[in-house]
Image (cartoon, rainbow, N blue to C red):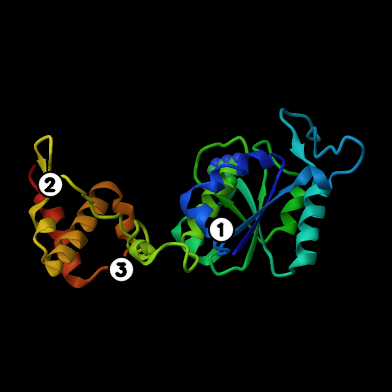
Amino acid sequence: MTFHVLTLFPEIFSSPLKGSILGKAQERGLVEVRVINIRDYAEGRHRVADDYPYGGGKGMIMKPEPIVRAIRALLEGDPKTWVVLMTPQGVPFDQRVARRLAAFGHIALVCGRYEGVDERVRSFVNEELSIGDYVLSGGEFAALVVIDAVSRLVPGVLGDAEAPEEDSFSGGLLEYPQYTRPPEFEGKRVPEVLLSGDHGRIRQWRRRQALLRTWQRRPDLLEEAALEEDERRYLEGLRGEGDGL
Ligand code: 6GU
């Protein structure tokens, strides 16, 4: 999987990508991140990549020519590159989008600055993504979020021990609570079932805890989750417990 990041701030990408899982994935050749400075595609002695907005207003707008030239150079190398514009106006990025992106070989992430990119750039990208309803000063951190979430889904990036199936959201539920040693910490004991060695009971407890947690914290996720009949009954029971309180 190759990510091409198009940005005016390439320095942002040097250290976060050295981190443990992403760093190893790159060393092992499973993931490659190529950072492209959009300024290198700007013309003139000053390589100007942004300009004032027509009609007035604050902030600077990224000029279309350098971005489109950078995209074209990428597509010449690999015409199948999937081009994504990172913008708060994009489709919300979630685990389902991450899974869809993981199927591409080459993804280009164009980092817009918050004030915006020239509207005409939009017709040169395949889709637009946002990572949530808040404002970042540019698409760079959003691109890092996408790179991390998608890389984890590339076969071989995670060891067998950390398969992505159990992560929060993969089955549409939040993850069950986790514990490690010691068995008692400041009076708080690890649930007995986890020390029992009974893998059937542990699996059942975890699934129920995942349901409970999702019901308590993110009930919106339950509408989309794939649930068994007995799990639906368990949730009905939870709803019933609240009655009359
Ligand atoms: Cl992709 N870009 C910016 N600038 N802000 C954001 C975002 C992206 N996603 C959420 N906020």
Q: Identity of the amino acid at label 1?
A: Glu
Label 3 belongs to which residue? 226
Element type at marker 2?
A: loop
* Depth check, front residue: 174 or 166: 166
Q: Quadrant of ligand 1?
A: top right
Q: Identity of the amino acid at label 3?
A: Ala
Element type at marker 1?
A: helix
- Tell whether 163 sits left or right of 113: left
Is label 1 within 8 A of ligand 1 (CB to nearest ligand atom)? no
Along the polypeptide, which appears first: circle 1 or circle 3? Answer: 1
Element type at marker 3?
A: loop
Label 1 belongs to which residue? 27
| Nearest-to-viewer mark from 3 and 2 | 2
Along the polypeptide, which appears first: circle 3 or circle 2? Answer: 2
Residue 48 place in picture, x, y as percent: 84, 37
Along the polypeptide, which appears first: circle 2 or circle 1? Answer: 1
CA separation in Å, label 1 and label 3? 36 Å
- Tell whether 188 sits left or right of 36: left
